[in-house]
Image (cartoon, grey):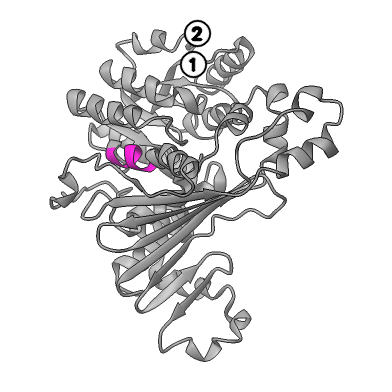
Amino acid sequence: MNKINVGVIGLGLRGSMLLKGVILPIDYVEVLGVCDLYEDRTKKGFDAVVEAKGNEPLCTSDYRDLLDMPEIDAIVITSAWESHIQIAVEAMNAGKYVGMEVGGAYSIEDCWKLVHAYEKTKMPCMLMENCCYGRNELMVLNMVKQGLFGDIVHCAGGYHHDLREEIAFGNENRHYRLRNYLNRNCENYPTHELGPIAKVLNINKGNRMLTLNSVASKAAGLEEYIKQKKPNDAELLNAKFLQGDIVTTIIKCAHGETITLTLDTTLPRSYSRGFCVRGTKGAYEEQTHSIFLDDVHNKYDFDWRQQWGNADKYIEQYEHPIWKEYIKEGIRGGHDGMDWLVFNAFFESVANKTQTPIDVYDAAAWMSISVLSEQSIAGGGATVYIPDFTNGKWLQPQKKTDSKYSL
């Protein structure tokens, strides 16, 4: 693999973990610059690079310093959500590949800026949605492509993750989620569930999302948590959170499929992405990791607990080729190995100067759900139209790619 030079912007919890656990261990990647608004984070990033690679990267609090370095091929953006698109646009205009960590958009105008920057510069921008490379998600995608579930009618997913501690201690940890939960009410983190679903439904590649409707419950979880865990925090005790505890979004697609997304991050619960695929011949359901096939499992209809976990029986036949090879090589990195796959997919594209497996049109469409859900919730669940960020390109036949990370 050709050597590539990378700059990393944003060295908080996510950025520093990715730098140390994923980016630096890749032998053909050199990190020439690290950036964060906080000097202590930048210093830790500098030390990590020196220890792992031996070179001394540029340290800066101004990301433009990295964009001005002609020797840098790609920028990895792991900063606060609000800054992602602005940095990505400037990086593309500076001739850099962009690997942008996930999060929602704040305006439709910003989503169009992403698209227009790519179409002007032809510099790929990849949304680093690691869940697209989850083992179960890829197995189900393989099943769908082989017709096991028939004609797909409905998909569902959620970001079900108790984040109360992370949000409530946002000031202490300098974390951006706190200010978002105080000031916005929307599906603020849609892509973990939507990314894999979009690949199942061929969104932007023969299909597209047309409309959405979103509703939000009241916001009570964080207020109760703060009373119990931070009784001396006068500022947060008197704060009113706008973000509803449960946000439900329903999307209608051009070919008639529906998608249900659920944001559930401020009430006590176990972790789940709630991935579900329903078709005319069967279904996959993540909560019980089970597969129901018509004329195979019908007799268990009212005694389904016997079949919980039966998806494991299908792994040998339907394991995705990406994971077959990955297991042989050895699973590495965070989030059950997904981080390693998504970053190698990005860096391989940079090294080979090819398009990324998740492209700028995916990024714009998936990120737009945040701002569109915000509009719908504010309108009492009103129907909101989802722009076609491809400008009709979704109708055209898709070119096959030789990348082993192709989705």
Mark 2 vs 1, N-terminal side:
1
Q: CA distance from mark 2 to mark 1?
A: 7 Å
Which of 124 and 165 lies nearest the eye of the viewer? 165
Rendering coords of residue 81 (x, y %) = 49, 28
Rendering coords of residue 206 (x, y %) = 21, 55
Q: Residue at x 73, y 22 (%)?
A: 172
Q: Residues within 10 Å of mark 1 (few under 14, many from 20)?
A: many
The amino acid type found where label 1 is placed reads Val
Snapshot quadrant of residue 51: top right
Q: Which residue is mark 2?
A: 60
Snapshot quadrant of residue 251: bottom left
Q: Which residue is mark 1?
A: 34
In the rendered view, does 64 fall on the left or right side of 220?
left
Q: Which residues are magenta?
A: 361-366
Q: Is residue 392 above or below residue 126?
A: below
Which of 323 and 154 lies nearest the eye of the viewer? 154
Q: Please report contact status of discs 2 and 1: CB closer than 8 Å, yes or no.
A: yes
Which of 33 and 176 lies nearest the eye of the viewer? 176
Q: Residue at x 55, y 38 (%)?
A: 185
